[in-house]
Image (cartoon, helix red, strand yellow):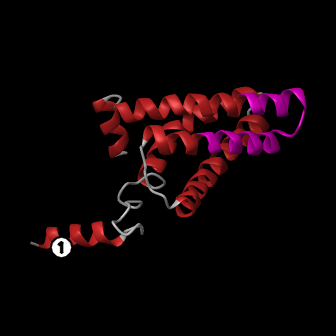
Amino acid sequence: MKKILHFLKKGFTKETLRYYGVGAIATAIDWSSFALLATEWHLHYLFSVLVAYSMGSITNYSFNKRVTFKCKSRKIARQMTVFLIATLFLLSWNMALMSIMIKSWGWGDMISRIVTTGLLVYPGYLLHRSTTFNKRLFKQANDGIINVATPIVVENIKSKH
């Protein structure tokens, strides 16, 4: 909650603006894919959102890594694993909210998709910034190995003195 209040007080940073720009591109891919699958091809909305979300997520990861967070970590497998876990968490919320909106409230597929995207965009930013693209977690050490423990140990040593 503190982070949300801080964000509202500080306004938009260059990083958040880049995140929203990348998100707009990924969302266009996601929503157009979803519309095609669910509306034109009449596939089930949960299957459609799974496929469309995956396409948008691949775009999101690629551009956010380079453009938004300027992450230079070469440990792609580890970072992709963290990204996948965070994305699955967000996808599960997306699908649960869509299911409520469609089944319980009688909303249409596309409007439910738009509303859930709006509800989850900022929590997604906070989640990916603090996990997937966390510079402390994915800092490249001189030897090319991710050095996860060092910043934490150094911080603990500094705080004790």
Near mark 1 (Cα within 10 A), the count class, few <14, some 14-19 or many ≥20, is few
Q: Between 46 and 138, which is closer to the camera in this rendering?
A: 138
Q: Between 66 and 27, which is closer to the camera in this rendering?
A: 66
Is any part of residue 106 visible from this angle?
A: no
**Lateral position of residue 9 relative to residue 148, left or right:** left
Which residue appears farthest toward the front when viewing the image?
143
Q: Identify whether 101 is placed above or below 130.
A: above
Q: Quadrant of the N terminus?
A: top left
The magenta-colored residue range is 32-59
Is any part of residue 143 visible from this angle?
A: yes
Q: Quadrant of the C terminus?
A: bottom left
Q: Between 56 and 92, which is closer to the camera in this rendering?
A: 56
Q: Position of residue 158 (x, y in %)?
A: 15, 68
Please name the residue shown 48% across and 49% down the image. Answer: 128
Task: Give the residue at mark 1.
Answer: 157
**Lateral position of residue 4 relative to residue 152, left or right:** right
In this rendering, the count of numbered labels is 1
**Lateral position of residue 139 relative to residue 128, left or right:** left
Q: Main secondary structure of the magenta part?
A: helix
Q: Position of residue 69 (x, y in %)?
A: 42, 43
Please name the residue shown 76% across and 35% down the image. Answer: 102
Please name the residue shown 60% across and 51% down the image. Answer: 87
The three-letter amino acid code for the residue at tag 1 is Ile
Q: Between 10 and 99, which is closer to the camera in this rendering?
A: 10
Q: Identify whether 74 is placed above or below 123.
A: below
Q: Quadrant of the rendered structure where residue 105 is?
A: top right
Please tell me whether residue 57 belongs to the stretch shown in magenta: yes
